[in-house]
Image: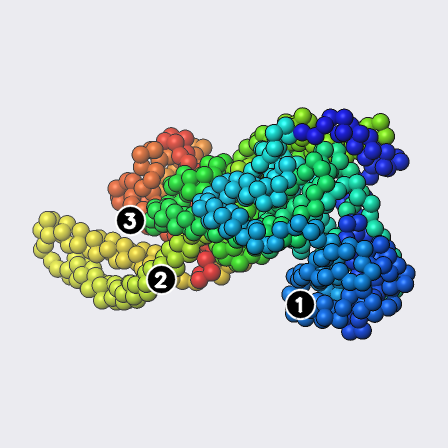
């Protein structure tokens, strides 16, 4: 690199330039577009375009034009610039665009340059800003660069990847400019650090390829100017800044805004930074992507360099082409990603065709693999299904709130969940550092807060920094100063708390799967509509059947039963076999009539509405005992009571449930003197009330417990245990389910049986 002794002298000079400690916050806040000065190799005038009078002049106009600044301010610009040139500057900047225009002029009378001068003009805050740079007599014309630029652009067009494109850019810009180092520097986000991803460097200079530079190296206001001004030249870090007169504009009270000025002076902080890395001159070409600062082509020289306007124009043109070609490559990669993601998403969606939530849980691994994720979750209608790494409950709630505020299909992703600000997403739970994923990608499914989300674990990533990013300052002989950068000061660190970043391919796959799932849900909704229509028709048919069963079938049965009864009462001289047959006929007719009554009652439960109110369970039990009490007394079964709260239920239907369960306990009481049935209630872990009817009866064998709730299912012959139709427990279960509750049992032969049921909110159609 440059001579070590020279570097040591520059480092000492940099430290000596500031008397005490280094305040990095001042660097971040510094208004670098309002520094009130220009680089000394040129001069500047700011002119009122309406009057042609000079409002601001560089303090070197006396040496440059032969007219001192204090004399020139307030005077017509025609004192130093002919009316033809002034008219050309006015016409070139008259449009809406804020791009500067440049043209050569012949040095006027009294100009110290004695030769041709390049003028650059742009408008700012109502003024026409004119910048003057002396042209070297042997400076090449733009045509001399034409073939080189053509060849550079041809090589650039041949690049097919971002890496190739950046390597070509570094090589071609160095060939155009002759700087000692040219690097392509890519930012990690709008305000993040940057990485050197391509480099062309002269022998003896330290390589920077692969190094990361802290975000503070290029503060926010500098990034804004790089977006506004494509090219920036610092010809010599030891240049003596030329001030402007007046120092502030009377109309604004602020210095002249030099955001678009090529001659704009340089921040002292940045000059110190350049000295500390052994750089005497620099040039930066902005790389923009969709109006965002993607990165920079940064050029460094060991000695003073002042690229001619033609060179700057060639580099600016190349930078524009470079930015456009990067956009083409990234768009092509995005298109390829969309096509590939569409194919993969379609194959995953086919797995979820029948029963979305159930199939999602079954094929969660394939859904997670679609985005190379560690976990996946579908949250829909308050239900969740997923696989892989579990999502913490508070994260699920937070994602649901976020999904409800977004447009369905709008992908949101972060690879650093813990770094998001408060009010965006929560960070990790205190004391539970492993409970949160590092990255989440979410796509809302509906405006109700339904969403599909993928998670990724933390992936520690090693980075080589040109300096410790946590300590951009270093204590030297003169106090704290900007840390020198370079491979000799490589600081190796591991980035924590981040996942692998989500790519455009990942976002495209998530969005495509959302689209396919939306179509799937709509198709299912259409199918449900058709099924509901079929169900309505079926219910009408069932209603017709119930009417027929109530009238057309029951009437013949009554006739059969009456005929058998009359024959038994009126006929004489019948033999014993005939009498037995008549009695059997009457008994079977009566039994069939009871079965039809039970069937009709069961079918009506599915159609009858519920009148749910807060019902006193103790009062409901008292009413049920009035009906079932005689049967309990007959079987010598004692009733026990536990705590009985109020529950949401239809009082008539709850009465029916309790009567059936109490009668069931009486029918299946055990042999012996100690017979009891107990009714109580408790809260389950989810806060739901569970009603328990427990007895010490004969119990139910394990292999028969699944049958007891079936319609017309009896575990004993009709002649035993008080008879019955086998409908009671089926009716009980149907009533509970109509309330939106659940019913189950626990039983052991010879020990007893416990029936459990809950009473949730009934269906909305109830």
Residue corresponding to mark 1: 92
- Residue 526 is marked as 2
Please name whichever residue, 196 or 600, is drawn nearer the observer in this view of the structure. Answer: 196
Residue corresponding to mark 3: 712
Q: Position of residue 42 (x, y in %)?
A: 77, 53
Question: How far apart are the two marked residues, 2 and 3, measured between alpha carbons?
Answer: 36 Å
Q: Position of residue 174 (x, y in %)?
A: 59, 41
Please name whichever residue, 615 or 8, is drawn nearer the observer in this view of the structure. Answer: 8
Please name whichever residue, 590 or 286, is drawn nearer the observer in this view of the structure. Answer: 286
Of tags 3 and 1, the one toward the viewer is: 1
Q: Quadrant of the C terminus?
A: bottom left
User: What secondary structure is marked by label 3?
Assistant: loop
Q: Quadrant of the N terminus?
A: top right
Please name whichever residue, 103 or 535, is drawn nearer the observer in this view of the structure. Answer: 103
- Residue 655 is marked as none
Question: How far apart are the two marked residues, 2 and 1, measured between alpha carbons?
Answer: 63 Å
Crowd tier of the residue under label 3, counting other residues whose Cα lies within 10 Å: few below 14, some 14–19, many 20 or above: some
Labels 2 and 1: the sequence-earlier one = 1
Identify the residue at image location x=59%, y=52%: 314
């Amino acid at each position: 690199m440059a001579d070590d002794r020279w570097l040591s002298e520059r480092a000492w000079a940099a430290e000596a330039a500031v008397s005490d400690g280094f305040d990095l916050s001042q660097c971040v806040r510094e208004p670098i577009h309002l520094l009130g000065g220009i680089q000394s190799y040129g001069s500047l005038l700011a002119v009122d375009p309406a009057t042609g009078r000079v409002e601001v002049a560089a303090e070197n106009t006396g040496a440059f034009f032969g007219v001192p600044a204090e004399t020139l301010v307030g005077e017509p610009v025609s004192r130093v610039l002919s009316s033809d040139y002034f008219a050309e500057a006015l016409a070139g900047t008259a449009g809406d665009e804020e791009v500067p225009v440049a043209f050569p002029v012949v040095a006027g009378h009294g100009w110290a340059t004695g030769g041709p001068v390049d003028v650059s003009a742009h408008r700012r805050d109502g003024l026409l800003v004119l910048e003057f740079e002396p042209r070297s007599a042997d400076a090449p014309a733009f045509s001399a660069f034409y073939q080189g630029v053509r060849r550079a652009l041809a090589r650039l067009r041949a690049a097919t990847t971002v890496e190739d494109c950046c390597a070509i850019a570094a090589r071609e810009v160095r060939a155009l400019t002759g700087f000692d180092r040219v690097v392509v520097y890519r930012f990690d986000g709008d305000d993040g650090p940057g990485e050197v991803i391509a480099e062309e460097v002269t022998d003896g200079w330290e390589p920077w390829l692969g190094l990361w530079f802290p975000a503070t190296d290029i503060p926010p206001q500098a990034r804004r100017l790089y977006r506004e001004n494509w090219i920036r030249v610092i010809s010599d870090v030891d240049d003596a800044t030329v001030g402007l007169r007046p120092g502030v504009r009377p109309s604004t009270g602020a210095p002249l805004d030099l955001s678009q000025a090529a001659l704009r002076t340089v921040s002292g902080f940045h000059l110190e930074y350049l000295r500390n890395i052994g750089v005497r001159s620099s040039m930066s070409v902005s790389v923009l992507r969709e109006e965002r600062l993607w990165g920079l082509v940064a050029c460094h020289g060991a000695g003073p360099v002042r690229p001619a306007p033609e060179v700057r124009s060639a580099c600016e043109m190349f930078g524009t082409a470079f930015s456009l070609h990067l956009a083409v490559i990234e768009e092509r990669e995005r298109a390829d990603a969309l096509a590939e993601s569409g194919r993969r998403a379609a194959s995953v969606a086919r797995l979820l065709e029948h029963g979305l939530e159930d199939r999602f849980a079954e094929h969660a691994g394939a859904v997670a693999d679609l985005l190379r994720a560690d976990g996946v979750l579908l949250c829909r209608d308050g239900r969740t299904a997923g696989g892989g790494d579990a999502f913490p409950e508070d994260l699920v709630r937070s994602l649901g709130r976020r999904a409800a505020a977004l447009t369905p299909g709008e992908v949101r992703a972060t690879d650093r969940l813990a770094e998001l600000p408060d009010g965006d997403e929560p960070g990790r739970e205190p004391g539970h550092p492993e409970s949160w994923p590092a990255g989440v990608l979410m796509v809302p499914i509906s405006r109700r807060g339904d969403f599909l989300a993928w998670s990724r674990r933390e992936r520690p990533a090693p980075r080589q920094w040109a300096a410790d990013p946590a300590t951009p300052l270093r204590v030297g002989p003169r106090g704290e100063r900007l840390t020198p950068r370079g491979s000799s000061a490589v600081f190796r660190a591991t980035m924590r708390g981040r996942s692998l970043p989500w790519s455009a391919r990942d976002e495209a796959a998530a969005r495509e799967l959302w689209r396919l799932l939306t179509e799937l849900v709509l198709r299912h909704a259409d199918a449900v509509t058709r099924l509901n229509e079929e169900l309505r028709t079926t219910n009408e048919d069932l209603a017709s059947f119930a009417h027929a069963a109530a009238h057309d079938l029951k009437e013949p049965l009554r006739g059969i039963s009456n005929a058998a009864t009359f024959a038994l009462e009126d006929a004489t001289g019948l033999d014993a076999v005939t009498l037995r047959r008549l009695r059997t006929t009457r008994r079977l007719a009566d039994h069939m009539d009871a079965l039809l009554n039970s069937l009709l009652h069961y079918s009506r439960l599915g159609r009858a509405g519920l009148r749910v109110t807060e019902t006193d369970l103790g009062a409901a039990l008292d009413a049920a005992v009035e009906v079932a009490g005689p049967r309990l007394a007959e079987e010598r079964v004692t009733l026990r009571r536990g705590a009985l709260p109020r529950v949401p239920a239809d009082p008539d239907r709850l009465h029916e449930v309790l009567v059936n369960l109490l009668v069931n306990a009486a029918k299946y009481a055990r042999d012996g003197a100690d017979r009891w049935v107990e009714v109580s209630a408790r809260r389950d872990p989810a806060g739901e009330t569970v009603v328990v009817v427990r007895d010490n009866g004969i119990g139910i064998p394990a292999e028969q417990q699944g049958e007891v709730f079936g319609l017309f299912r009896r575990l004993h012959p009709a002649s035993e245990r008080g008879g019955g139709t086998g409908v009671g427990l089926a009716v009980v279960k149907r009533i509970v389910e109509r309330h939106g509750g659940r019913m189950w049992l626990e039983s052991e032969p010879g020990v007893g049986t416990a029936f459990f049921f809950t009473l949730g909110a009934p269906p909305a159609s109830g």
